[in-house]
Amino acid sequence: MIATPISSDALLHVTKGIPGSLSLLAELGRMLSGLQIKTSGIVALLNRNPQLGERVLLLGNSPLYNTGARPYLTLQEVVADVGPAEIYRLVGLAMARLASAEPLATYTISANQLLENTLFTALLAEALVDTGKLDPRAAFTAGLLRSVGKIALDHLGKEHLQGGTHGRPDGLADWEMAYLGLTNCEAAAVVLRAWRFSPEIIAGVRDHYLIGAKPAGKLAHLVNVAASVTARCGFGLPGESDYFEASPEKYAAAHLTEAHINDAVVRTLYAFNQIRLAVGQS
């Protein structure tokens, strides 16, 4: 059975209900890429979602970001002290915490599983980047948003799904095609395009399962490796084991070596443990 594909309009409608205002991350990225970066503009952007602004302030006051003698009282203080280079990551982490607040029943994924997978994949993808060949921010973003299609499809699952939930360790994309009419990677591409993320990030998320005849770019291979190693470290998601098997070919396509990956894992585990604690407290 192949289901009738869920329409783009239905996907985009349901994303309005995704917590965390993930679409604002694309806007923040464009703002930070400008010639003149204004703290007031970043604060105004974050304040468009009061829940996100509150979460950023809370996370900014965690020991991970605030090592001073007094707490930050306003978003203005957080943005000014953290600085443009780190504020993107801080906002992304706050968004991940909000977007992972609910379990994905359609995929039998708990809220904590989703959060840990999202954080670890994003941090590892960033750590794997050779800064001369790939933008660390693009890698972090693609890792952070790789499951946004699952979130959107989960919201639509009750309306369109007639075959129960996916609880197997593999074959997720085939199951999605049979019961939902498109894969979570395809759904993510629709959503990220509407949110005006860069073509590089859209393709990196859309193609990171590395299935189909179309060649995938370096970012897709890097996200695939990051997700594979994330699963190896105990933070994988059900249904994806078929797509994340390690291979020298994948490493070569992402310009990675085993030594590079092992070093990135050590650095990621340290950062992840700090960030998991900070995000959990915020």
Image (cartoon, rainbow, N blue to C red):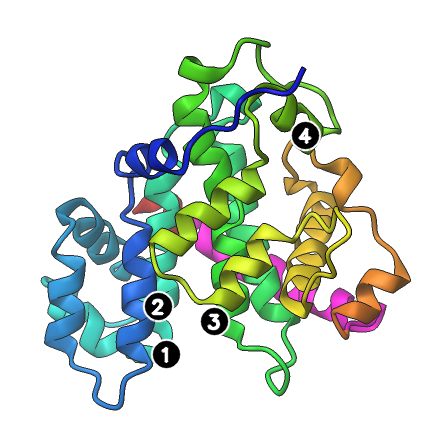
Q: Label 4 to label 2, Cα distance in Å?
A: 31 Å
**Image point (12%, 57%), residue name:** 47
Q: Label 4 to label 1, Cα distance in Å?
A: 36 Å
Side of 213 where 227 appears, left or right = left
Side of 1 where 72 appears, left or right = left
Q: In the image, residue 211 lies at what x, y percent?
A: 74, 46
Amino acid at dot 4: Leu
Question: Considering the numbered disc 4 on the image, is that residue within a helix, a strand or a loop?
Answer: helix
Q: Label 3 to label 2, Cα distance in Å?
A: 8 Å
Question: Considering the numbered disc 2 on the image, is that residue within a helix, a strand or a loop?
Answer: helix
Q: Are marks 1 and 2 in contact (CB under 8 Å)?
A: yes
Q: Are marks 3 and 2 in contact (CB under 8 Å)?
A: yes
Disc number placed over residue 88 in the picture, else none:
2
Q: Residues within 10 Å of mark 3 (few under 14, many from 20)?
A: some
Question: Considering the numbered disc 3 on the image, is that residue within a helix, a strand or a loop?
Answer: helix
**Image point (44%, 34%), residue name:** 151
Q: Which residue is disc 1 drawn over?
A: 85
Disc number placed over residue 172 in the picture, else none:
4
Q: In the image, residue 185 lies at what x, y percent?
A: 57, 43
Which numbered disc flags the more N-terminal residue, 3 or 2?
A: 2
Q: In the image, residue 32 lies at what x, y percent?
A: 30, 78
Q: Please say whether residue 263 is one of the residues in the magenta stretch.
A: yes
Quadrant assignment for the N terminus = top right
24 to 127, vertically: above or below:
above
Q: Which residue is disc 3 drawn over?
A: 137
